[in-house]
Image: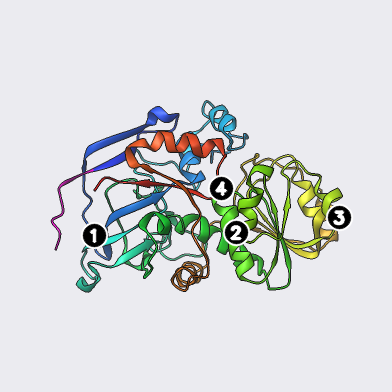
């Protein structure tokens, strides 16, 4: 059995603000697993929009900018820490962020089978157990509790899911948050084989995952992405690429798709409901172009549309995702890895949006 140190390297988020709020330390106490918890030695941790959103206070209703590099900076001064967490409540600082984790269980708390030590696991980022398993109530790994931007982290044992795969830790760490978000959107929208789905932001972490997962279901996938990323998104399974600045109605026509998976929102949002067929479904889990949109309610009710906000995972989603990984039905899309201490450089590249897939942080051995 490996010896567990008393201190570890970790990145502390000291408060809402700029990159100066991220502090790399080598003297952070290693957490002790409580009852029903496991201690995980982190092999890799993915970077996500939520890391930046939380740092800058973007979830506050006082922020109306998108999550581009400029929007993130613009949102700093207006961030209200009283409602700047995923749950709409204030966060406590310092906080170790990081929702995406692949690692190995090295210790267990009371009530957890000791045989689990040594298991390779993915941590489900949507933690329903601490919230009492209430419908649409959850804690978020790396938000309401410490996450994976560290050498060690702890999590409820029920949310540490064993995974058997030949993929690297970095490749596996690209899955939990983005792919479970995408699969949850497709699950809520009930996407079936033979249907057509439009995916916005298709070169990002969730968007590229949605392309793969929709294709896995047998759907025809139309992906909205920049021309420089068209080949990469096509390789993930997209049947058609639509440029980001295209007029969707002119390009596709009205009532052209059965499902929209949206990560962008912003000023062009009304077009998304126009291209959805009557009785169609719209699922959203992001607003990188801006959270404030214009809705003509007549479009909503006259077309009998169904709109789904998607945050808390349906119970079956993460287990299904692990199964897809183990059977090789989906593949990772890792653009680049960084040492954990270079988290600022990783977030700067993330905000630049010039890559396809995921950026992943590697803690020191």
Instruction: Tell me which numbered mark, 2 or 1, is placed earlier along the sequence.
Output: 1
Q: Decide whether residue 34 is among the magenta residues.
A: no
Q: Which numbered disc, 1 or 4, marks the residue closer to the eye?
A: 4
Mark 4 or 3, which is nearer the eye? 4
- Judge by depth and name the residue closer to the eye, 187 or 312: 187
Q: Which residues are magenta?
A: 1-8
| Marks 2 and 1 in Cβ contact (< 8 Å) | no
Q: Which mark sits nearer the N-terminus, 3 or 1?
A: 1
Label 2: few (<14), some (14–19) or many (≥20) C-alpha neighbours in 10 Å: many
Marks 4/3: CA distance?
Answer: 27 Å
Indicate the position of residue 103 as horizontal and vertical percent values: 31, 58
For disc 4, the marked residue is 356
First in sequence: mark 4 vs mark 2: 2
Q: Which mark is residue 34?
A: 1
- Residue 94 visible in the picture: no
Secondary structure under tag 2 reads loop
From the viewer's side, name the closer residue of 262 and 104.
104
């Amino acid at each position: 059995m490996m010896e567990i140190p008393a201190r570890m390297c970790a990145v502390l988020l000291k408060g809402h603000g700029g990159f100066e709020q991220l502090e790399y330390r080598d003297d952070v106490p290693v957490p002790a697993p409580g009852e029903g918890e496991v201690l995980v030695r982190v092999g890799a941790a993915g970077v996500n929009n939520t890391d930046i959103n939380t740092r800058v206070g973007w979830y506050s209703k006082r922020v109306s900018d998108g999550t581009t590099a400029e929007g993130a900076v613009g949102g700093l001064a207006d961030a209200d820490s009283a409602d700047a967490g995923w749950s709409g409540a204030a966060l406590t600082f310092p906080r170790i962020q990081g929702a995406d984790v692949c690692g190995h269980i090295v210790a267990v708390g009371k009530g957890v089978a000791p045989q689990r030590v040594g298991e390779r696991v993915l941590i489900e980022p949507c933690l329903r157990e601490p919230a009492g398993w209430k419908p649409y109530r959850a804690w978020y790994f790396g938000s309401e509790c410490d996450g994976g931007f560290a050498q060690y982290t702890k999590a409820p044992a029920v949310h540490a899911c064993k995974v058997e795969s030949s993929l690297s830790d970095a490749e596996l760490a690209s899955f939990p948050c983005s792919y479970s978000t995408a699969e949850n959107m497709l699950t809520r929208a009930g996407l079936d084989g033979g249907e057509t789905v439009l995916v916005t932001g298709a070169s990002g972490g969730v968007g590229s995952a949605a392309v793969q997962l929709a294709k896995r279901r047998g759907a025809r996938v139309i992906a909205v992405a920049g021309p420089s990323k068209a080949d990469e998104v096509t390789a993930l399974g997209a049947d058609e690429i639509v440029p980001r600045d295209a007029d969707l109605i002119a390009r596709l026509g009205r009532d052209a798709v059965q499902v929209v998976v949206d990560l962008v929102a912003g000023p062009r949002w009304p077009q998304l409901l126009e291209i959805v067929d009557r009785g169609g479904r719209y699922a959203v889990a992001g607003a990188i172009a801006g959270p404030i949109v214009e809705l003509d309610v007549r479009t909503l009710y006259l077309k009998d549309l169904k709109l789904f906000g998607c945050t808390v995972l349906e119970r079956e989603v993460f287990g299904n995702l692990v199964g897809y990984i183990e059977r090789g039905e989906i593949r990772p899309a890792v653009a680049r890895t960084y040492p954990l201490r270079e988290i600022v450089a990783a977030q700067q590249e993330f905000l630049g949006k010039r890559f396809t897939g995921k950026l992943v942080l590697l803690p020191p051995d």
